Image (spheres, rainbow, N blue to C red):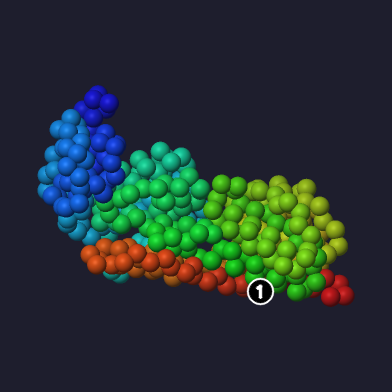
């Protein structure tokens, strides 16, 4: 521990870990705020001395000064959804006269997410935004007691005061309802990764809509969001009359459509397909793709608005309602013969 601390300046996280308290408690001790027990204050001060952590003006800026900078943590991939969210968070922050320091996690573990947060806190950001792509990041967001506001873009069946999201669940139900109303009775699902919160919420919507209509549920196949994985699954997917496929994102839909063409099957004559995201290319595919549109611009604005609200000294924490998703009907879906 001592050797590691000599290589870099100690952070508020380091002090909290050594003292066995939250980062917020360390902040209260540093700023001589009330409601900290004397024994706890003593442990914190001993940890500060042991780590040679100085509550200098730079350190105090974590909780007492504004740098007008938002820290943004993104997944270490270039998927359309997270990339779009990051772009619109940057735009909304600029409009609010804030700058953004962006970092990507090195891996998906809880330790990797914590390391990214620590790095941003050393840069004295006013708040941290996490774009959640895997469940591990969501668990970190739920567990951390931060000295600055922490907001996550994260789909979950349990919205919290720290999350902002687009309604993946109702978007998925709308997609399945559309296929069922076209007469499809066997609606398969190609889902995203099993550890992705967005994939879980879309899968939950698919299951619930099938159950509500008393339609058969066949366990979903899982891809990795890529067109290549959609193509691989499409090569082996069992297709019978009346089959439709709700796909977890548009990229996998593109791969699926290519595989079905290679197999001599026609979309939507033999198989109807609905995607998710409404990527810019979706309307120019052959056939144009029916999909669920996510308004990433609105999501970026909502995330930054929540950050700014959290920075107000007298702001009360509130749980936001997920933003709506919109079904966009194009030519990749059609009625079953005789429907």
Residue 142 in picture, x, y percent from top left: 42, 51
Residue 339 in picture, x, y percent from top left: 84, 75
320 vs 301, nearest the viewer: 320
Q: Furthest residue to the top? A: 3
Can residue 268 be seen here? The reply is: no
- What residue lies at 72% left-to-right and 67% top-to-bottom? 212
Residue, disc 1: 329
Quadrant in which the N terminus appears: top left
197 vs 162, nearest the viewer: 162
Vertical arrangement, residue 46 with respect to residue 156, above or below? above
Vertical arrangement, residue 321 with respect to residue 4, above or below? below
- What residue lies at 69% left-to-right and 60% top-to-bottom? 207
- What residue lies at 17% left-to-right and 37% top-to-bottom? 42
Drawn side of residue 287 relative to residue 32, left or right: right
Q: What is the total number of numbered labels drawn onto the structure image? A: 1
39 vs 52, nearest the viewer: 39
Residue 35 in picture, x, y percent from top left: 20, 51
């Amino acid at each position: 521990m001592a050797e590691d601390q000599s290589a870099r300046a100690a952070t508020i996280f380091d002090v909290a870990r050594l003292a066995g308290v939250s980062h917020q408690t360390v902040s209260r001790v540093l700023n001589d705020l009330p409601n900290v027990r004397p024994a706890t204050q003593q442990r914190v001060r001993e940890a500060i001395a042991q780590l040679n952590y100085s509550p200098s003006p730079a350190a105090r800026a974590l909780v007492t000064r504004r740098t007008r900078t938002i820290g943004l943590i993104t997944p270490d991939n270039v998927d359309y959804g997270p990339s779009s969210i990051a772009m619109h968070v940057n735009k909304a922050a600029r409009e609010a006269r804030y700058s953004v320091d962006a970092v990507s996690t090195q891996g998906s573990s809880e330790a990797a997410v914590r390391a990214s947060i620590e790095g941003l806190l050393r840069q004295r950001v006013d708040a941290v935004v996490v774009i959640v792509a895997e469940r591990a990041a969501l668990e970190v967001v739920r567990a951390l007691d931060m000295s600055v506001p922490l907001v996550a873009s994260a789909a979950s069946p349990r919205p919290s005061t720290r999350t902002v999201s687009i309604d993946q669940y109702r978007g998925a139900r709308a997609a399945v309802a559309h296929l069922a109303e076209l007469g499809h009775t066997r609606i398969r699902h190609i889902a995203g990764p099993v550890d992705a919160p967005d994939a879980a919420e879309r899968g939950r919507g698919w299951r619930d809509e099938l159950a509500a209509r008393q339609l058969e549920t066949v366990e979903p196949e899982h891809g990795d969001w890529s067109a290549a994985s959609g193509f691989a699954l499409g090569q082996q997917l069992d297709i019978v009359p009346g089959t439709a496929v709700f796909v977890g994102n548009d990229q996998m839909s593109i791969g699926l459509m290519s595989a079905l063409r290679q197999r001599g099957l026609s979309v939507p004559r033999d198989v109807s397909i609905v995607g998710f995201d409404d990527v810019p290319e979706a309307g120019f595919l052959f056939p144009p793709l029916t999909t669920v549109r996510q308004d990433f611009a609105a999501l970026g604005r909502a995330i930054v608005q929540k950050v700014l609200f959290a920075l107000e000294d007298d702001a009360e924490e509130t749980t936001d309602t997920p933003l709506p998703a919109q079904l966009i009907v194009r030519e990749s879906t059609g009625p079953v013969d005789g429907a």
